[in-house]
Image (tube, helix red, strand yellow):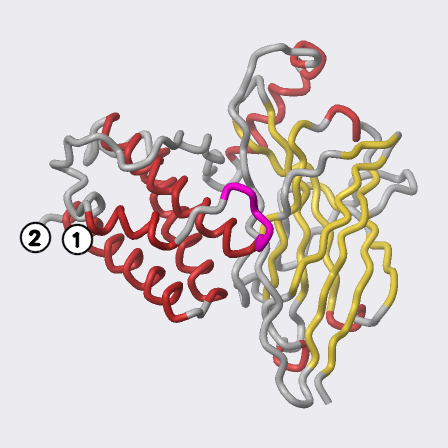
Amino acid sequence: MSDVNKTIQKWHASFKKGTDFDSWGQLVEAIDEYQILARQLQKEVQSANSSDFTEEQKKTLAKIATCLEMRSASLQCTQSKEEFNLEDLKKLETSKLIRNVLTYNKEFPFDVQPVPLRKIFAPGEEENLELEEEEDATAGAGSTEAFPPRAPGTLLPRLPSEPGMTLLTIRIEKIGLKDAGQCIDPYMTISVKDVNGVDLNPVQDTPVATRKEDTYIHFSVDVEVQRHVEKLPKGAAIFFEFKHYKPKKRFTSTKCFAFMEMDEIKPGPIVIELYKKPTDFKRKKLQLLTKKPLYLHLHQTLHKDS
């Protein structure tokens, strides 16, 4: 079996695993599986070196990723007006679209558009591009070119409670930035890392923030940490990466980041400092973003099942 067929087989197995979790009511696991597969498909679509798939086939892969993201969003938002249900998603299985993506020549089962994908960078690549952007930052302001909407929101529901264990909800209130009003489609990526920078939980993205006021971007969104506080290892930290879209370069960029360590987990409001990118998950070489009093404003709620 060729490498590309092995890859397709893995995608199909991942899709089946996600829909199984979904049908069993294991929604956290289903969302996780859908998002992992969507990212794998997006990575393949964006790969400039890949000759395994034609441009048409890549469009199909991108549309499958869109369906996965739509189903994931439906599971996270019970009041979604445009619900994408499990039966809809399973049509990708019954049409054998994923398994036969190399030979599939029928119309895609749904009228969806490929979600514009976040550029995946090699280490340091994004920072090199940023140098160019400083020169044309003003040129991009007021641009009227239309870009299709991006849909980062991948927030997960709260875990089931366990006797004697504590769950943490972090409300991201707002972030202070001197150029807050110029940030396009801003959102936060939240991750929990161990002392070596390894993910302990699924990575989550907030929806795009829509309210800007002076030097603040308001999020007002709750993030459910996907592990009981007691199970977080010593030296772990919760990271918040602020990202925004750069229309001139057509990619989403990390502007700055913040983090919260284990001894800072306590109920109530907390204000944490912002650091320059690239995100340093090991917390070895930290550089403050600004000397101005601009911070990330959070509010923590602890839920303990006695």
Mark 2, residue position? 1
Count up the numbered dots. Answer: 2
Amino acid bearing label 2: Met
Task: Give the spatial CA distance, label 1 vs label 2.
Answer: 7 Å
Q: Secondary structure at mark 1?
A: helix
Instruction: Please give the range of residues in magenta.
Output: 77-82
The residue at the point 79 percent across, 30 percent down is 180
* Residue 167 occupies quadrant: bottom right
Pointer 1: what residue? 6
Q: Is residue 20 left or right of residue 5?
A: right
Which residue sits at x=80%, y=32%? 212
| Residue 120 falls inside the magenta stretch | no
Q: For this view, does 258 lie left or right of residue 97?
A: right
Image quarter of residue 107: top left
Q: Position of residue 200 (x, y in %)?
A: 54, 67
Amino acid at pointer 1? Lys
For residue 91, above or below residue 48: below
Disc 2 is placed on an element classified as loop
